[in-house]
Each structure stands twice: as C-alpha cells, then as structure tokens.
Amino acid sequence: MSASVARLALARRPWPWLGPLLVGIVLVAAPWWLPNQYHLHIAIQAGIFAILAMSLNLLLGYTGQLSLGHAAFFGIGGYTSALLGKHLGWPVFVGMVLAVVAAGLAGYLIGRLSLRLRGAYFVLVSLSFAGVVALIAVNWMDLTNGPLGLPGIPEPAIAIPGLGEFSFRSKESYYLLVLACAAVSYFVCHRLVCSRFGRACVALRENETLAQAVGVNGTRYLVVTAVVSAAMAGAAGTLYVHYTRFVSPEIFLFSYTVTMVVMVVAGGKGTLLGPVVGAILFTILPEVLRAVTSYQWQMLVYGILLILTIFFLPKGIVPAVAGWWRRVAPRPAAATRTVAGEAEAHEPAR
Amino acid sequence: MDILPQLVANGLIIGGTYALLGIGLTMIFGLMNVVNFAHGEFYTLGAYAALFVLSALAPNFLVAILGAILVGALAGALVERLLAPLRHESIDTTMLLMIGVWIAMQNGELLAWGGVAKNIPTPFPTEPVVLGPLSVAPLRLFVLFVTAGLIVGSHLLIQHTKLGRAMRATFQDQETAALMGVNVERIHTITFAFGSALAAAAGALLGSVFLVYPSMGDLALQKAFSVVILGGLGNLGGAALGGLLLGVAEELGAGYVSSGYRDALGFLLIILVLLVRPSGLFSRAERVG
C-alpha cells in the first residue's frame, strides 16, 4: 500500500509533513514555473484524469470490481452541469454540485443492480449502462443536440461580495480549481481507505466469506463505494466540460474508460498514489507520442503497454518503485521502533 | 401488423450471427473463466480475412468464409498461448489482459487496413426472394443457412465427439478431467480457437451483409455480451437462444419504436434479465447458486 509506504518512508525523517508540503507547494506553484500555456493545459488534463483514475481505483483497487462504465459517470456529470448552466442559466458551481449528485445517483442504480452479482456481471452491466447513456445522448436531440454537441458552456465564476465577480476563464485559475478538486478527491480516498470502511472493502476483496462471517455486509459496502466512485467521476466530468466549454456524446467514448483502466493498472491499483502517478504519466505520454506518431499507433502502444504491465509489473509502477526503494534505501539504526510501527501501518491497508 | 413476420425473419437472420458470437464467448468464459474482450476483434478479423481471400486468392464466397474461420482459429490459438501463463490469475487480471489485446488488435487492424468502410463482394443477386409475406435477400438466406449449419455443427461437435466430451469434462472439472487423461492445455487452446473461429465466421457473414470497418467489432462485442448474459454465463444452448432472441427484439424495437435506440435494446434486456433472472433466461434451476 503506497500511502503507508509513503508514510513509513517519511516516518524515518524528523518532519513527516515536509515531503507532502513541498509537493503541495510545487503543485500549487505550477502556473508560475510551467513554461507556457500548453504545459498548463496538459497539467489541467492530468488533474482531471487523476480524479477519474482515483475514482476508478476505489472500485477496482479496493473492492476488486472493474467498472467499464466510468465514461458514463464522467459524461453524466459533464452533461448535467452543462445543461443546467446553458439551458437554465443556473450558476455553474450549483450545476457542478448537482452534476456530482447526478453521477452518484447513477452509481447507486448500477451498484444496486449488479453488485449483488459482482465480478463479470458488474463489468458487463456497467459497460451496458455506458452504452445506453451514450445512445441517449446521441438520440435525444431536443435535450442534448445529439451528435453535434453543446457549444458555449459557461465557465465557472464566483461572486465575491465587494470585489465583483471572479471568473475561472484563465488557464491558471482553472488549473488551481482542478488541483483543489483533485486534492479533495485524494483526501476523500484517503479517508475512505484508511478507515474501518476501507479495511472492510479490502477484507471483502480478499475473502468475502470470512468478511461476511465477521459481520461485514458486502453489498452495502460495495454500493457505497460505487456511489462515491461514480460521484468523483462525475466531478471530473463537470470539470472537463466547463474547461473545454463544449460537450458532445464523444465524452462517453469507451477510450476514456480504457485510458482510466490503463492509468490505474499501470500506476498501481489498490494504492492511493498509483492512479495519480498513472494519470500524470499517461497524460504526458500521449502528448509526447503525438509529436512522433499518429493516434492509432498511440492506442496500439497503449494496448501493448497494458499487456506488458500485466506480465512484468503486475502490481503497477508505484508498488514496484516503493519495493525497490525499500531495498535500496539505507535503514537508519534508530528506526527499530518505527519499523514495528511500519508493519502495523502496513498491514491493515494492504 | 403486416410487417411483423418480416421483422421476425430479419431478426432471426441477424440473431443467428449473434448466436455464433455468443456461443464463442460463452465457451471461452465457461471453460477458462476469461471475459474475452477481444472477441469482437476476431469478428473483425474474420470479415477482413474474407475480404482478403476474395480479392487476392480465390473469388469464391464459401472459400472466403472458410478462410475467415481458419484465420480466426489461428489468431484465437495465438491469443490463448499468450493467456496460458496467467491461467491461475484472477478473472480481473485476465480481463485486463484481454482489454489490452482488444485495443492492440483493433488499432493494428486500423493501421493495416485503414479506416475506410469496405464492401465484401458476394455472388448473390440483390433481387429479393419473395416467400409469401416475406421478402428476403438471397445473401441473407445464405447467411441463415451457414449460421444454422455452424450452430448445429458446434452442437454435434460438443455433444457427440470425443473432443467435445473432453471439452465438456474440462468445463466441469479441470483436475478430474486431467486425471482422466485429458490434455487440459490442448483443450484450452482448442476451445479458444473454436470460439474465435465462430466469431470470425459471424464477422465474415455479417460483414458481407453490412460493411467491413475496423471498429465493427465493438458493436459485435456488445451484442455478444448481451447474448451471453441473456443465456447465462457459460451456457451454450442459452447463448444460441439468446442470440436469436436479441436479434428479433432488436428488429421489433427498430421497427415499432425507433431505429436510433436499436442498439440500446440489448442493454435494456441485460438489465431486465439481471433484475428478474440473474442466472440467465435459459439456465436450468440447478445451475443457480
């Protein structure tokens, strides 16, 4: 478990909060040290994908249920706030909150329906659900303008009393908004995973019969996880839509789901940092590849990378690097007490 | 009401190819516990193989379909060899691997043949055959006969040959089958190849009715999943009936409701079936639980 690994790595140092604080400062300062707007654009995308990957990881990594319908929650979030903002003129932030709620509701429906059955059924139902939602977006011309999409979606703005209105139109401000949302998502994941709740989920994943025997109500936990996961994907969707200020049924493209899966699996499913690392890596990688090859070659590389990861890094990048670090890093002599604490910190989260 | 027989007939013809897809997918799932996300790509591969045989080797439609079946079987065997080291991994791991294979295959196909939709030339006249209230294109009749033949052939192979018995034995209990002298590894390869060959045949047949393009497999994959859930995971007879049912339901939906939502019907059927009878419509009671 990477969070605990990170925690133990830090526990040996005098100031455990120093590392995260530095990372936080570097991230917040990104608009000032990134060379241009293009890089900032990629950073915004990476942030949105990090939220998506974290949300998928909640289900795939901690409960072991693979959702292939995450593009649907992403799209539902996007369409909800886009329609509220464009057609009804609601304030964007209200629309964004409702988008998260709508996606969470959709997650509840899907969870109730299929998590009783789990496994392959959940995969297929989530996939089918995404298919239905995409078809509705294409066919319901009056509401969604069909395949043409909805242009001119308002950007988020906030009225500060006495100072006038502050709009998130610039890339800098939008980056900070995305970063804040990603941080909240990370915090939510952290709270969930490192709680009784998270331990119950892992127990269910590892041995359901035993978990049930000690009083963990499997279906309930899975449904709650599905709701939180879908709501987070919805948040990513609404952030995406108000950033590009355009939404079309392409938001439901299966390639979004595939990208999320690749990010989570390659980064390290069932770890807190894995999906974030995966998201950053697999947002930058296509941009680098774009300069040298076409989209098809990129997707081909994606597929092959996924296959190779399963064979050679079955746990993902973050656990692999953490394991390597533990072998390489010298262990301070005074750390015996911490090592005992480590094992304790390590055990429940795995 | 007068279009009803026509819709049912069209549905049965299309449904037959769905049944082929579903039988292949459900065999692979039932035997290997692998959710084969690359199934649609074998379908696409079959269509392109038929196209290739027709344009480059022999201008004979039957030979083209045989070629498609052969290519599908070969590709399936290859992919199974890739899967073999992961035999004892969880269903999630193999599923992710198959997603990787799917993406790689689809984009490989796109790179190999380009994104332009192509037409498979067929020797059949376009003039429809009129049978009472029905009028059916000769090509579609041919598709109906070939799918019926393939489904009956699969049934005979599985139920009445030594190989089929070994397959069913492995299906039920791998270890016992191995103890009885069944070469389980070989059965796995053959089953995967067989399932893929059926998908390739479906691709060649349906590709000649409609068009051939690299992403045609995605829709086929969705249909195959719907069919398999309708019939119950791992249930061969259920998949055959589920395919026909889905084909007819789609035609009726497109005919009476709206053709835009044609592809949504499969999804709705899945959701309904999962609500009412999660073990599949056609599974016997003892399979539940």
Image: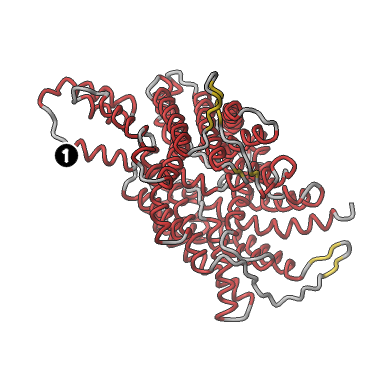
Please state which of residues B162 and B213 is positioned toward the viewer in this rendering. Answer: B213
* Crowding at mark 1 (Cα within 10 Å: few <14, some 14-19, many 20+): few
Q: Judge left or right: residue B226 versus residue A37.
A: right
Q: Position of residue A196 (x, y in %)?
A: 40, 19
Residue beneath disc 1: A328
Q: Position of residue A311 (x, y in %)?
A: 34, 50
The answer to whether residue A60 is seen in the rendering is no
User: What residue sits 39% from the left and 31% below the top?
Assistant: A206
Please state which of residues A168 and A289 is positioned toward the viewer in this rendering. Answer: A168
Which element is circle 1 on?
Answer: helix
Q: Please, is residue B279 above or below residue A105 in the view?
A: below
* Quarter of the figure that contains the C terminus of chain A: top left
Please state which of residues B284 and A85 is positioned toward the viewer in this rendering. Answer: A85
User: What residue sits 63% from the left and 51% below the top?
Assistant: B223
Residue farthest to the left?
A: A333
User: What residue sits 58% from the left and 53% below the top?
Assistant: B221
Which amino acid, by three-letter code, is at mark 1? Val
Q: Position of residue B45 (x, y in %)?
A: 54, 65
Q: Please, is residue B138 above or below residue B165 in the view?
A: below
Q: Looking at the rendering, which quadrant does residue A211 occupy?
A: top left
The answer to whether residue B51 is seen in the rendering is yes
